[in-house]
Amino acid sequence: MTQLEIARKGILSEEMKICAEHEGVTPEFIRKGVEEGVIVVIRNRNHHSITPIAIGKGLRTKINANIGTSRDHTDLSLELEKVRISVAAGADTLMDLSTGGDIRAIRKAIIRESSLAVGTVPIYQAAVGMLNKKKAVSGMNADDMFEVIEENGEDGVDFITVHCGVTRGSVRAIEEQGRLLGIVSRGGSITANWMACNDRENPLYEEYDRLLEIAERYDMVLSLGDGLRPGCLADATDRGQVQELILLGELARRARERGVQVMIEGPGHVPLKDIQANIQLQKALCNGAPFYVLGPLPTDIAPGYDHITSAIGGAIAGAAGADFLCYVTPSEHLRLPTLDDVREGIIAAKIAAHIADIAKGFPGARERDDLMAACRKAFNWQGQIDVSIDPERTRQLLETSESAKEEGCTMCGEFCAIKLGKKEAMK
């Protein structure tokens, strides 16, 4: 049985109990959330080396780190180091988005190395497989797509992004309205091109029951991808994006009926004033399914700093009800991320998630900030390091200051407001 089928029988699975302990909630809270479709418990039944993780309503906002090769840069040792950095920096999940090299071998190595749940986008491997055969990507058929999905399940992939809502109708909605930047999702673009070249409907939509059968077999969570997400502010919340979201809501319902857990992926670039409305729209159309957002990015003009842009949008999205933030690194839109980029992206996303958890009233979130304030008042430098979201960075900066030798950092010196306040209180 899948976690959803177990939950419907009123049974508390071992995975639910583990997730409950990590979240500080009761196992029944997790079970009920899974049954209602507002929580997913992620772990492929073939993936025993990881701790299961729960994502959804009433739980800590989670973050994902993307890694993976390209056809220009294929270095497995580098990707495995990214895995180690992601774990150390505090990511909750990993996605392998490799498009270069032996993708299955890379995926298996990442799964072996990772202590985190691992996700993939199978359409990438299917497309690369055609190129490796010196064939056009549009030449693949439904069997090619589903065989790769089955392979991912066998290998222990915990969740997969599938662009089932990219249909002839939703793509036509974009074409009729017009877009400044068009389709920016790789998976969405591959699918739209395949449909145009073959004059056929998307197999992942047309044969959706086949996809559900595979997902149920391995208890893989389906992350219904936003293949028509806006890639710039000008295209946000247009007909194509909303049409796809309506379809994803219906597909989420069908998945739950089959006993398959599902979450929904959300928009990329959205004006700040529209972020909350986008989250509310998704929750309404998809019956509260966990929402997995890329960013969102509330401006288009910050290449090199998009981890900051994303953190701003992610904090607002999380506070509005988004459950799962995909990190964005400083290299977004520019290059494959370096090791430093991966770490910077994770920390920025963790900041956004923590801000969201404070807004949601998640137990323990605000208390951590209060503890930091108490440590600052007491000039407890080690306490500040321990409580900080990035202890390594905090320690490095403190070591370049005289703060370890006297009460006060080098910013204010003798004019330290806290020191002056203590002297005033002693009079």
Image: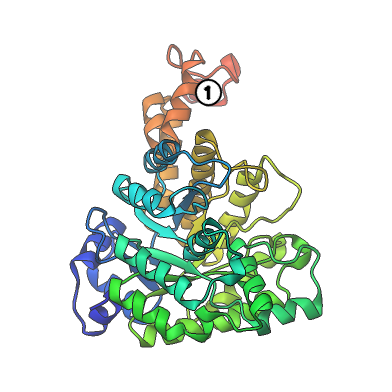
Residue 277 appearing in the image: no
Q: Is residue 91 left or right of residue 413?
A: left
From the top left corner, tell me how far across and down residue 403 is, in percent.
47, 17
From the top left corner, tell me how far across and down residue 400 is, in percent.
51, 15
Give the camera-side residue of 17 and 415.
17
How is the rendered protein coloured? Answer: rainbow
Residue 212 appearing in the image: yes
Q: Is residue 202 above or below residue 149?
A: below
Identify which residue is drawn at 43% across, 11% down.
405
Q: For the residue marked with disc 1, what is the amino acid?
A: Glu
Q: Is residue 337 above or below residue 321?
A: above
Q: Is residue 136 above or below residue 355?
A: below
Identify which residue is drawn at 50% across, 35% down.
339
> Badge 1 is on which residue?
424
Q: Quadrant of the N terminus?
A: bottom left
Identify which residue is drawn at 48% across, 66% down.
161
SS at circle 1: helix
Q: Is residue 116 left or right of residue 199?
A: left
Identify which residue is drawn at 41% across, 36% down.
77
Give the camera-side residue of 350 and 209.
209
From the top left corner, tell me how far across and down residue 251 is, in percent.
49, 83
Question: Most extreme residue toward the front, as rendered?
Answer: 134
Q: Is residue 41 left or right of residue 295?
A: left
